[in-house]
Amino acid sequence: HPLMLARALTSRNIQSIPDILHSKIGMKEEQYYKMTSKKAVRSQFWTRPNVRQILHLFLSDLKFSKEETMKVIMAQPQLLNYRVATLRQTLDYLREEVGLNVSRMVLKRPMLLTYSVKNHLRPIVDFLKSMGSKEWLGWRRMLESYPQLLFHSPLEMKRKLAFLATSLELSRRQDAVLIVSSFPPVFWLRAELLQEKMDFLQSALHLDTDELTFLVTSFPQVLGLSIEQNLRPKLSFLLNHLTMEQLKEFIAYQPSLLAYSLENRLRPRIELLKTKSIEFRYSPQYIMSLTDAQFQKWVDINTSTWSPV
């Protein structure tokens, strides 16, 4: 019957995949063809039922908006090659067993859902838990901020912990754990690069091993700073206003001094102090940590009472 045939032809069961993506998340035709033109995308293996189920997983289970779902699919269209049961198994494990905010993690690293629970994720989670219950609470927060931690193997993690323990002559394993739990990118930065940065800091600041260890354990984020683009010009500038011993005292008091922007914080503030006849070396060691309003207030209060040196 013509009417029955028309209804069948307009049924959702024979919607094309581009039509499904358009109706569910608003993907335009040109976006679809741009996405499927990528070399790694094998759209010929996509099926309509699986695409619908994956979109339902994002929109309903993960509570993504249409825009967020579009962003994930456009960034990683390979997700549509996986069976929804595979993705759901990973989702359920991370959310129900590990207790993580998986939605936040998948937005950052969509391919996380494709990793095997048995062969990859569970061994890593078990390894992190083995470091202690107190540390595990911190690791859970870190995994949500840095889901790419789960892309590494326990063996890689053990090797990096051993490297830090040897390079910094750490007597306790927990000190190495503290470094990587405070700054997880240490796990995926090459050991050679980390060693180069530690050697530079030790040489440039005339640090002994204990002083270097204190700096790195207190502020491991320093290992993420570029030598040439950040550390070298910053230390050179600061040494124009401080002696080496004064600089070491400032850094020992507040290691994060090394992370402040040279052009947006350090230089403008030191130059302003200079115009007020205030020597940076005699200012409080916490002065760079003040907000702009707090810093200006400190300057205003001390300008009238400061004696030029």
Image (tube, rainbow, N blue to C red):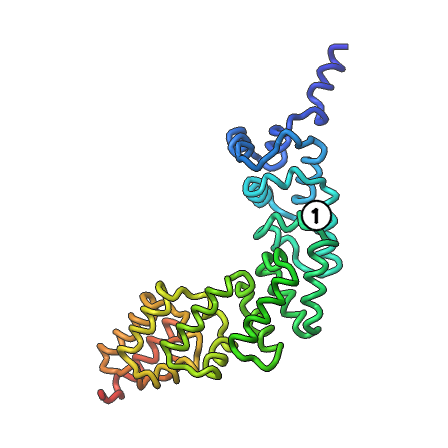
Q: Quadrant of residue 222?
A: bottom left
| Towards the viewer: 89 or 188 | 188
Q: Give how far across and how far down residue 153 sits, in percent.
A: 64, 59
| Towards the viewer: 59 or 136 | 136
Name which residue lies at 66% across and 31% down: 45
Q: Quadrant of residue 203?
A: bottom left
Position above or below: 138 against 300: above
Badge 1 density bin: few <14, some 14–19, many ≥20, Cα 10 Å: some
The amino acid beneath tag 1 is: Asp
Name which residue lies at 48% across and 69% down: 221
Judging by the rendered image, the residue that carries numbered circle 1 is 61
Q: Give how far across and how far down residue 234 sits, in percent.
A: 33, 70
| Towards the viewer: 168 or 175 | 168
Q: Give how far across and how far down residue 55 sits, in percent.
A: 66, 40
Q: Quadrant of residue 80?
A: top right
Name which residue lies at 63% across and 29% down: 44
Q: Give how far across and how far down residue 207 sits, in percent.
A: 41, 81
Query: Which quarter of the rendered picture does the N terminus lie within?
Result: top right
Position above or below: 54 against 120: above
Name which residue lies at 57% across and 45% down: 68
Please, which residue is most extreme toward the top here? Answer: 1
Element carrying mark 1: helix
Query: Which quarter of the rendered picture does the C terminus lie within?
Result: bottom left
Horizontal side of 291 relative to 50 (left or right) equals left
Horizontal side of 182 relative to 8 (left or right) equals left
